[in-house]
Amino acid sequence: MQNPFESINSRLETIEKYLVKFDDRFNLPSSTQLPDRYEQGIEIACQELGTKPATIYCNIDKIPHRKIHGKLYFNRAELQAYIKSEGKK
């Protein structure tokens, strides 16, 4: 009898190969280039956006973030994309 985890692993590897081909075909950045990690603290947004905390708080509804248990978390890649998209309105 085959181990069910081997079958799952094989299917996941196939999916991963298709995703890599899809990324290459449409010139998307690979998942290794964009960190999916959220970091806690307003300082992250201040560093990436080059502003003061008060500016971040005043515009928090426009800035990509997550709020978990009253704490703000920011993803650097999302903040960079936000900066690039702001000039294209």
Image: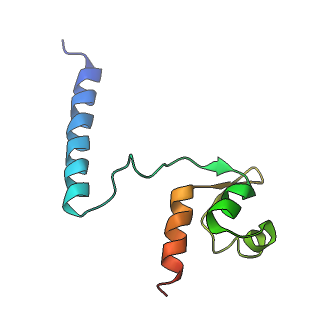
Nearer to us in this view, 63 or 66: 63
The residue that appears at 20% across and 48% down in the rendered structure is: 18
Where 87 falls versus 76 (above or below)?
A: below
The image shows residue 55 at horizontal and vertical percentages of 76, 74
Residue 22 is situated, as x and y percent measured from the top left of the image, at 22, 56
Farthest residue toward the bottom?
A: 89
Residue beneath the point at 49% across and 74% down: 84
Rendering coords of residue 24 (x, y %): 22, 56
Q: Position of residue 28 (x, y in %)?
A: 30, 60
- How many marks on residues? 0
- In the shown orientation, is residue 42 left or right of residue 18? right
Quadrant (top left, top right, bottom left, bottom right) of the N terminus: top left
Q: Quadrant of residue 70?
A: bottom right
Q: How are the residues colored?
A: rainbow
Q: Is residue 22 left or right of residue 58?
A: left
Q: Quadrant of residue 62?
A: bottom right
Instruction: Report the residue that reaches farthest toward the right.
Output: 54
**Left-right relation of 77 to 20:** right
Image height of 89 relative to 18, above or below = below
The residue positioned farthest toward the top in the image shown: 1
Q: Look at the picture and state if 86 lies above or below 31.
A: below
> Foreground residue, 69 or 24?
24
User: Which of the 4 image quarters holds residue 4?
Assistant: top left
For the point 52% across and 65% down, the residue is 80
